[in-house]
Image (tube, helix red, strand yellow):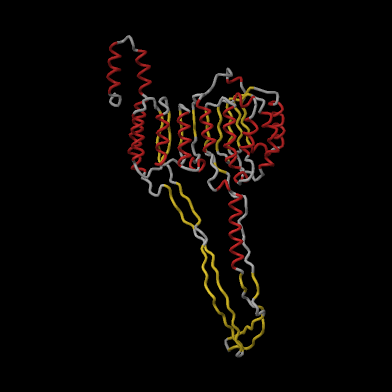
Amino acid sequence: MISAQNGDLDDLPSFVIKWSTLTNPSSVAALNRLQRWLGIGENLYRVEFNFDIKTNESPDEIWKILANFWSSLRHCEVELFTLRGTCNIEADKIRGHDKICTRILRTLADDSKFAESLMRLEITECFVDFDTLATLPNLVKNSQISSLRLANLKLGLHPSMEPIVVELKRERLPMQKALEIKCAKSGCCSCWCCPAPAYDVKWQDAKDDIDAGMKQFVAAHKDLTGSHTGAESLVQVFETMAARHPDVVDMTGTHLPSFCGSVTGVRDVMRAIAASKASAITLIDTGLTDVHIMGIADAFFQNRCLLHFSASLTCAELTGIEVLQSIVQNSPMLVSGSFTTGEPLKMTFAKPIETEHVGPQKQQACCLGMCFKQQYSVHRLTQTVSEHQFPATVRGKADFDMYNGALSNEIKEHGLVPMFTVLSSMWNGDSRKMKNLERAAKHPAVS
């Protein structure tokens, strides 16, 4: 993973910049000096920018501080770039603006020395959206990236609109005044006129306002309806990397079903990862379930030289893990990896708004033999939610551990293959040692 392309790494500077230090004016001055130096065009080994503390500043305010730095970095040759922690930018979780991650990648991607030299990219614990993912294919295309880590990414698509408040329009009853009786324990002692407490609700107007508000929300948040996904962008990224025979693809903690929008989308991304023929693939806590087993199988079928594979699965049945066990047994180059249990996806769905009409009802008040009647109707609006888990039933850890143990043993035995190869080349002239090595190869678990 450490490239010698640029010579001795001790001669190449590396920088780790933390947002917390930039709250100090002297640190901001140091950043300004650094960006002037970078503008000359230096060779760097590693640059990491870490938003390590929570901040309530807007993305626009943050970008005013950092824009010149990223523009300067475009002129530098960098082998490893890490962007971490934009999930600490509170405003970045809201949809409707360019994420900090998007702005950074867009600045660095096009026609720059940075992109041309970049070999490893790590983006972790960041708020992204589909525009962010759309910038990745261009950056990967213009670079030499052979190791990609997109870990713990979160979709920053929280609604930008405030909750819709429908004000019910009211009109007074024709009877503007009503008599009210004030009573004590000894009996009724007096009566007088007071404003009527009851109002007539314009029900149809209120219902129309609710319907219009819902249509307005849907129109303003089309990217929340499933019509947009990141599957196509991710497929382009891995297809571009395939020509380079990448070292590592790591998607730990990035929920693929949310980013891809459908089972088909996840399957397309898994096929592209498999076709990239990466030496090591990590898909831990990515939301994979039984329905994605064929996508995982593609990673083995299309990549005979796979050395490491780690994934977590949420299983309703054991059929899928049995298939994986068979595949691992027939993948002799796999020398490292694991399969662990994943957490089921829990979602809360809002049910349709229900209306209940009670009426017409009559209300009567009497005072000194004079009675007044008023008629009214009641409209009640209610909305409940339902919670669902996917898969609905999940196999327990004990069921999974039995197969996971068998998979681990198979992988351990594969680790003996390269060791036997090395020993056979060392002992090629010693018949006794070669005979013992042959016997050990037939029964590795015993030996």
Q: How many marks?
A: 0
- 26 to the left or right of 272: right
Asked if residue 157 can be seen in this view, the reply is: yes
Quadrant of the image occupied by residue 293: top left
- 272 to the left or right of 440: right
For this rendering, which residue is in front, 418 or 156? 156
Question: In this picture, is 237 found above or below 161?
Answer: above
| Residue for point 63% across, 39% down | 100
- 216 to the left or right of 406: right
| Residue for point 70% across, 26% down | 39
Image coordinates of residue 265 in percent, x first then y, are: 48, 39
For this rendering, which residue is in front, 327 or 200? 200
Image coordinates of residue 23 in percent, x first then y, are: 68, 39
- 195 to the left or right of 136: right
Quadrant of the image occupied by residue 362: bottom right
Asked if residue 127 can be seen in this view, the reply is: no
Residue at the outermost bottom position: 369
Image coordinates of residue 365 in percent, x first then y, are: 59, 83
Quadrant of the frame with the C terminus:
top left
Image coordinates of residue 178 in percent, x first then y, are: 64, 82
